Amino acid sequence: MRRGTEFSIMLGANELMNSRLSGSEEALASLVCAELDGRPQTKMLIGGLGMGFTLRAALKGLDESAQVTVAELVPSVVTWARGPMAEVFGACLSDPRVHVHHGDVGEVIRAGALSWDAILLDVDNGPDGLTRQGNDALYSVAGLRAAWQALRPGGILSVWSAASDVAFTRRLKQTGFAVAEVPTRANGKRGGARHMIWMATKAGRVHSEDEGSTCRLRRPDGAGMRQKRSARAIG
């Protein structure tokens, strides 16, 4: 749906995405890039193209040696991105670091072990999906184990959701990830709906400070944030 320069992606009466509200989708990438800062030849997998907010934020935070694969299941989303929504996407799809995979991100995850430094999932509405029952497999214990196996040591699985989910946090921990929950807002510092991002780290991370039970995240504004594993970040 388009209103002037504003675009919306709708599922019936539910608005899945709006071109005016990009804060939490950008944070999905910004948080990860801050953690991977300095890692050479980063390989990142993004599940879901959406309106390109996460992709553009990732390209901004990664150096020229990085490789970013975007897995998009719905061909029309890529067609819109290169057509009527080109003004929203800008030049991100023509960036030489970017490869678009037309297919299921779950298949890409399962295709190879130790393949990725980061996997970013903005698929459906998060663990409590709306659009496709098959997406639930990404957030199941089996799906999370596949992501864990696909990540290199120190790799990060970052997941966007429209809401918090205690059961999903528990599944991440059961899989072996060190977990931090980061509340975000749909319109960034300007507010908007409350969303949740999980930062799940596989052992061996580059920025580990010691072998204790703490992890360190950086907010999108660059401020450090130290917290106990699995503890929710303070907004």
Image (cartoon, rainbow, N blue to C red):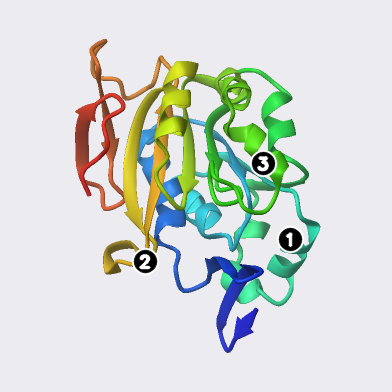
Residue 7 on image: x %, y %: 59, 77
- Of badges 1 and 2, the one in the foreground is 2
Residue placed at 28% from the left, 24% from the top? 229
At numbered mark 2, what does the secondary structure look like: helix, strand or loop?
A: loop
Quadrant the N terminus occupies: bottom right
Residue placed at 74% from the left, 73% from the top? 83
Residue placed at 66% from the left, 72% from the top? 86
- Tag shown at residue 42: none
* In front of the other: 176 or 111: 176
Q: Residue at label 2?
A: 187
Amino acid under disc 3 = Asn
Residue 73 on image: x %, y %: 75, 49
Q: Residue at label 3?
A: 135
Residue placed at 55% from the left, 51% from the top? 125
Amino acid under disc 1 = Val
Q: In which quarter of the image is residue 34?
A: top left
Q: How far apart are marks 1 and 2 (CA)?
A: 24 Å
Q: Classify residue 75 as left or right of residue 188.
A: right
